Image (spheres, rainbow, N blue to C red):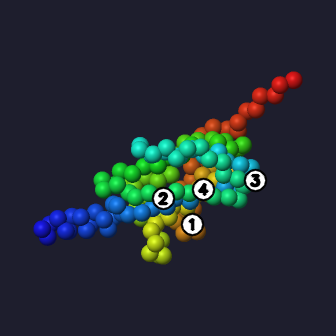
Amino acid sequence: MLFLFMFFGEAIGLGALSRVDVRITNKMASNVIIHCKSKDDDLGIHVIYSGQSYGWGFKVNFWQTTLFFCGFTTEKGRGVYDIYKAGRDDFRCLNDFGSGDTCFWDVKDDGVHGYVGVENDIWFKWTMNRIVRQVNH
């Protein structure tokens, strides 16, 4: 019995079954189109207007394999990136408020930036250049 308590207590302490919120803020002058998914959930396509944010919450699975990835389309570039990855983000997204953990991301002209507090610790550069618009004459 003590073994089970120690095992489950440690797993929960490392983030399993804990609630996480993700907040993505558009810091660009133009809109961002975003499409986020996990293995089990498709959050749909959303437009994040300049200066606005989009977010969602979830519980990390027991096995610590929770993964959410998002596709971004902007005037400056596009790409698909892992926005929440349990092994990477368990401790990255901790806060001191006791109300759950939040992962903060900003979409900027040069890519998607992840933050620990005010420090930028992850930078995903755009993988494709600007969207080419077809002009009809």
Q: Which residue is mark 4?
A: 54
Q: Residues within 10 Å of mark 3 (few under 14, many from 20)?
A: few
CA gap, disc 3 to disc 1? 22 Å
Answer with mark 4 or mark 1, whichever residue precedes in sequence: 4
Q: Quadrant of residue 115?
A: bottom right
Position of residue 97 relative to residue 51, above or below, is: below
Residue at 63 percent of width and 58 percent of height? 53
Q: Which residue is mark 3?
A: 29
| Residue type of the residue flagged with mark 3 | Ala
Marks 2, 3: nearer the viewer: 2
Q: Position of residue 17 (x, y in %)?
A: 34, 61
Residue occupying the point 57% across, 53% down: 123
Give the quadrant of the N terminus: bottom left
Q: For mark 2, what is the residue?
A: 57
Earlier residue among tags 3 and 1: 3
Q: CA distance from mark 2 to mark 3?
A: 26 Å
Amino acid beneath label 1: Glu
Q: Which disc number belongs to residue 119? A: 1
* Quarter of the image that includes the C terminus: top right
Q: Nearer the viewer, mark 3 or mark 1?
A: 3
Judge the density around disc 4: few (<14), some (14-19), many (≥20) Cα neighbours within 10 Å.
Answer: some
Q: Position of residue 101 (x, y in %)?
A: 46, 66
Camera-side residue: 118 or 96?
96
Residue 54 percent across, percent down from the top left: 60, 56
Q: Amino acid at mark 2?
A: Gly
As drawn, which residue projects farthest toward the top? Answer: 137
